[in-house]
Amino acid sequence: MTVYQQPVRELSGNARESGKPYHLRIQTAYAHIVDEAGNPLPVPEKFEVILEKDQQPFAPGDYTLHPSSLYLDRNGKLSLSPRLAPLRAKPATA
């Protein structure tokens, strides 16, 4: 996954059903995914990450999914909420 820019889009309002106020901070990233045969797609797919309340935006760079991205939802189904972890730079070879 790659973050190219740091801007954050903000959405706020009142929830339709509960009437409670909400405020979301959203950052765009791009996932380098594969097709059904396991071949890398030539162009990354855009997706959005909802930032935590006081979380700083992700700096431009390459990331992987953090293990906490996977969880069981209230129905016991495996779900995904993207949380990014920076990829460690590969050491330079001599």
Image (tube, grey):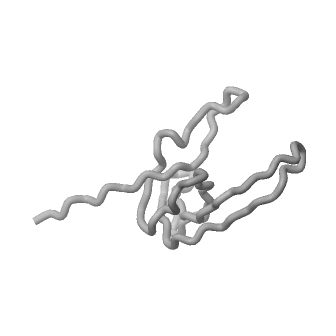
Q: Nearer the viewer, residue 36 or 55?
A: 55
Q: Nearer the viewer, residue 12 or 43?
A: 12
Q: Residue at x 72, y 28 (%)?
A: 75
Report whether 81 appears left or right of 58: right
Which residue appears at 45% of the width and 66% of the height?
Answer: 59
Left or right relative to 93: residue 54? right
In the rendered image, the vertical position of residue 32 relative to residue 20, given as above or below: below
Total labels: the figure holds 0
Residue 74, picture quadrant = top right
| Residue 87 image position (x, y, % from top left) | 37, 56
Kindly identify the residue that appears in the image at 73 percent across and 62 percent down: 11
Rendered position, 37 above or below 73:
below
Please tell me in which quadrant of the rendered image residue 93 appears. bottom left
Residue 69, relative to residue 27: is it above or below?
A: above
- The one nearer the camera, 92 or 17, is 17
Q: Residue furthest top?
A: 76
Quick check: 21 above or below 1?
A: above
Percent position of residue 86, x then y: 40, 55
Whole-percent x, y for residue 44 in the image = 54, 66
Q: Residue at x 48, y 57 (%)?
A: 39
Q: In the picture provided, is 56 more to the left or to the right than 89? A: right
Q: Which is nearer the eye, 83 or 2?
A: 83
Quadrant containing the C terminus is bottom left
